[in-house]
Amino acid sequence: MKTIGILTSGGDAPGMNAAIRAVVRSAIYYGCKVYGINRGYKGLLEEDLVEMNLSSVGDIIHRGGTILKSSRCEEFKTQEGRLKGVKVLKKYKIDCLVVIGGDGSFNGAQKLSELGFPAIGIPGTIDNDLAYTDYTIGFDTAMNTVADAISKIRDTSSSHERVNIVEVMGRHCGDLALYSGLAGGAETIIVPEVDFKVEDICNRLKTTQKRGKRHSIIVLAEGVGNANDLGKEIIKITGADLRVTVLGHVQRGGCPSVFDRILASRMGVRAVELLLDGKSAKVVGVKDNKIIDMDINEALSMTRSFDKETYEMAKILSI
Ligand code: ADP
């Protein structure tokens, strides 16, 4: 009988609970014991562990956040910290670890594997910034949250004939801005993957205003820069009546979408199957709607390609 440890780490994402549930339930189904490690690597180093059973994960598939809590842990970035972590895992006779998080958390899992401790990564981040997988858990929910916010801002933007800049998360990845911007009918979408000129945005605003359209939504990915700074520049050039909304952490919360719950369930089960197969240093993902797994080093070395086609299409549609 194997004993599996599970933790959530880094930025939280809706659907992490569904992934925890899938790991715990499938592990117990296959006859394993499971320890939940609270507060990510920090909790591991502080020996904050609890044995989980079927009811530990009852009534959570639809809940945002993570019942195991999440944190960031500088100490785990050091070799001493990680050796301390392995010692704790061995003390509890844990054979292998499932890490749910983003690329930072995967780096931690990769380093653990290098120390000979089997670890598997499940991608949980609203940023969708991992190249090896089409989707990360939480991205779909966050897209819907942002699209909903844009629709609401659009109502007031239209009433007051204003320009609104909506700053969205995503770190260096423009996916959240692109797809939620497209779904929300944004007039302009600015992402880190495509260069832009403030003058071009201002010219577009002037052209549409001449046509009689007095309101406009600009979706700005946080990786490009600060929405307030951009707003000031646009006001200076156009004199527009402009407001800025930084959506912030609302994007990380909420009830996970059906898509995220199903994705998390599928990925969680695959992670357990990999560990039962004796696999280590792997990450689980989804490609063309098939659950895949990949060597963690290979996955982390991949460069994300941006969906330029959809970006160009969004531009055409917002003419
Ligand atoms: P995310 O997993 O969402 O990308 P972070 O980048 O903040 O979030 O990483 C989460 C945690 O993963 C860090 O606080 C640290 O404990 C661990 N981590 C990140 N990078 C490394 C690394 N190079 N080696 C070991 N652990 C790491």
Image (cartoon, rainbow, N blue to C red):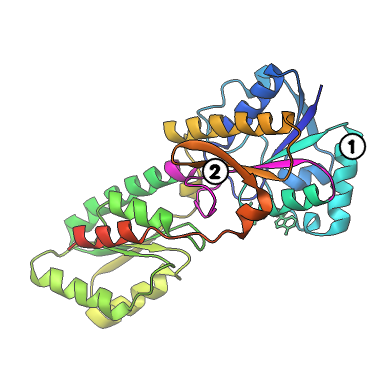
Label disc, if present, on residue 304 of the rendered structure: none
Above-or-below relation of 181 to 253: below
Above-or-below relation of 222 to 206: above
Label disc, if present, on residue 90 of the rendered structure: 1
Which of the two residues, 40 or 132, is positioned nearer the viewer here?
A: 132
Picture quarter with the N terminus: top right
Say which residue label 2 marks.
13
Examine the rendering and report whether any part of residue 257 can be seen: no
Left or right: 156 as drawn, with respect to 37: left
Quarter of the image for residue 56 reads top right
The residue mark sitting in front, 1 or 2, is 1
Quadrant of ligand 1: it is: bottom right
Give the amino acid at mark 2: Ala
Q: Residue at x 27, y 74 (%)?
A: 201
Q: Residue at x 12, y 64 (%)?
A: 213
Start-end of magenta stretch? 115-141
Q: Residue at x 47, y 47 (%)?
A: 134
Left or right: 317 as drawn, with respect to 69: left
Number of callouts: 2
